[in-house]
């Protein structure tokens, strides 16, 4: 992702999940679809963890990285725990997973669009750090690791 603009890579990876969900909505039971669908969704799911950390660091900086990344992963964990229960509830009520997959597909369209339209990475002035000076104007103590060029 250092060579390609990460939001475009992320949007492409998440589009694979969208393709997988749309194929799953129209699943015909064929062996080809049985192999292709989990591959598409799995690639996107694997990319999610990597790009979350990368984009968090690039857009919000390292000073707040751990707090933000922890919050994001905490929210993801709650969703991963609750989503199957919601899907099961919808299945019990409708007899199909199509409603849940349609909602997820819509959410992915919004996500891919928002991610693809992210702007340039902010400049946090890390190249200008000298003698322990922090971007906020404060100074690092001896016990605080500093980024010195």
Image (tube, rainbow, N blue to C red):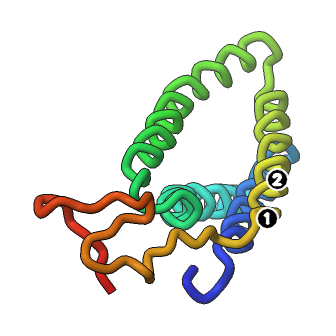
- Residue topped by disc 1: 116
The x and y percentages for residue 42 are 58, 58
Which label is found at residue 9?
A: none
Numbered disc 1: secondary structure: helix
The answer to whether any part of residue 83 appears in the image is: yes
| Residue 148 drawn above or below residue 140 | below
Residue under the point 58% across and 27% down: 84
The x and y percentages for residue 135 are 44, 65
Viewer-proximal residue among 86 and 135: 135
- Residue topped by disc 2: 23
Apparent side of residue 141 relative to residue 16 in the rendered image (left or right):
left
Outermost residue toward the top in this view: 93
Numbered disc 2: secondary structure: helix
Outermost residue toward the left in this view: 143
The answer to whether any part of residue 31 appears in the image is: no
Q: Quadrant of residue 3?
A: bottom right
Viewer-proximal residue among 49 and 97: 49
The x and y percentages for residue 140 are 24, 61
The first of marks 1 and 2 along the sequence is 2
């Amino acid at each position: 992702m250092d060579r390609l603009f990460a939001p475009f890579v992320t949007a492409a990876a998440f589009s694979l999940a969208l393709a997988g969900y749309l194929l799953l909505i129209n699943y015909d039971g064929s062996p080809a679809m049985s192999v292709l669908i989990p591959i598409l969704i799995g690639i996107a799911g694997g990319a999610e963890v990597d790009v979350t950390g990368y984009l968090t660091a690039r857009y919000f900086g390292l000073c707040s990285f751990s707090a933000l990344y922890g919050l994001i992963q905490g929210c993801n964990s709650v969703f991963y725990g609750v989503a199957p229960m919601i899907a099961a509830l919808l299945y019990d009520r409708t007899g199909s997973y199509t409603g849940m997959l349609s909602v997820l597909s819509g959410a992915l369209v919004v996500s891919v669009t928002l991610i693809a339209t992210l702007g340039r990475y902010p400049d946090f002035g890390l190249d200008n750090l000298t003698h322990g000076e922090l971007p906020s104007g404060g100074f690092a103590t001896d016990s605080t690791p500093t980024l010195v060029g």
